Image (tube, rainbow, N blue to C red):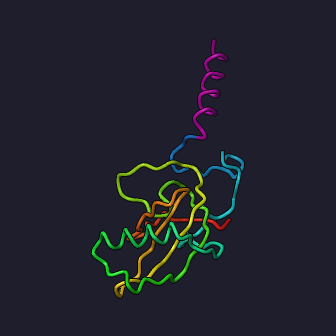
Amino acid sequence: MRRLGVLTVLVLLSACASGVPGASPSPSDSRFGTTEPMPSMSAPSGTPASVSAARMEAIRQDLTGRGVDTGQLAVVSAESVTFNDGSLGCPQPGVQYTQAQVNGMRVVVQAGGRTYDYRFGASDTPMLCEQPGPRATESTR
């Protein structure tokens, strides 16, 4: 009976050892299997691209709807980008997004003396990114 009690205590202690507060897991304990540093949070970067007429018209209509004079609309940059999720690199608080990579485009334009950052997914519907969030990490494709 005493052997059973000692054996039970040893089994319980070994099972709990990995969950001891303050204990440092060994590298082999990681379930992710990597020691690479996390990627830095950065603005999107991608391959230079040209903007289709449909997308330029969609940007023009969106800006006009916001009361911006588009007479001097100019493209500052346009890039093909693979976004990490459905937020297109511009997550909004309280909104849930698809957790899959999205091939899209980032188009920065100037109009009315201001710069505007537009994002596109698969469609020609623009999303104005007024303030990229800290989790806006994209990779080039």
Please state the extent of the stretch shown in magenta in the rendering: 1-18
Residue at 54%, 43% (x, y): give it.
20
- The C terminus appears in which quarter of the rendering? bottom right
- Return the residue nearer the eye: 109 or 6: 109
Q: Is residue 2 magenta?
A: yes
The reply, left or right, for residue 122 in relation to residue 140 is left
* Residue for point 61% across, 62% down: 82
Residue farthest to the top, as pictured: 1
Q: Position of residue 48 (x, y in %)?
A: 64, 76
What is the chief secondary structure element of the magenta stretch?
Answer: helix
95 over 129 or under it: above or below: above
Residue 73 relative to residue 85: left or right: left
Residue at 45% x, 64% y: name it.
126
Indicate whether 26 appears above or below 66: above
User: Measured from the top left, where is residue 102 in percent x and y?
Assistant: 58, 56
Left or right? Give the position of 71 relative to 101: left
Farthest-out residue, left: 67
- The magenta stretch spans residue 101: no
Where the N terminus falls, by quadrant?
top right
Relative to 99, say whether 16 is above or below. Answer: above
Residue 71 occupies which quadrant of the picture? bottom left
Q: Estimate the x, y position of residue 35 in percent, counting from the top left.
A: 69, 59
| Image location of residue 76, percent across then percent down | 51, 83
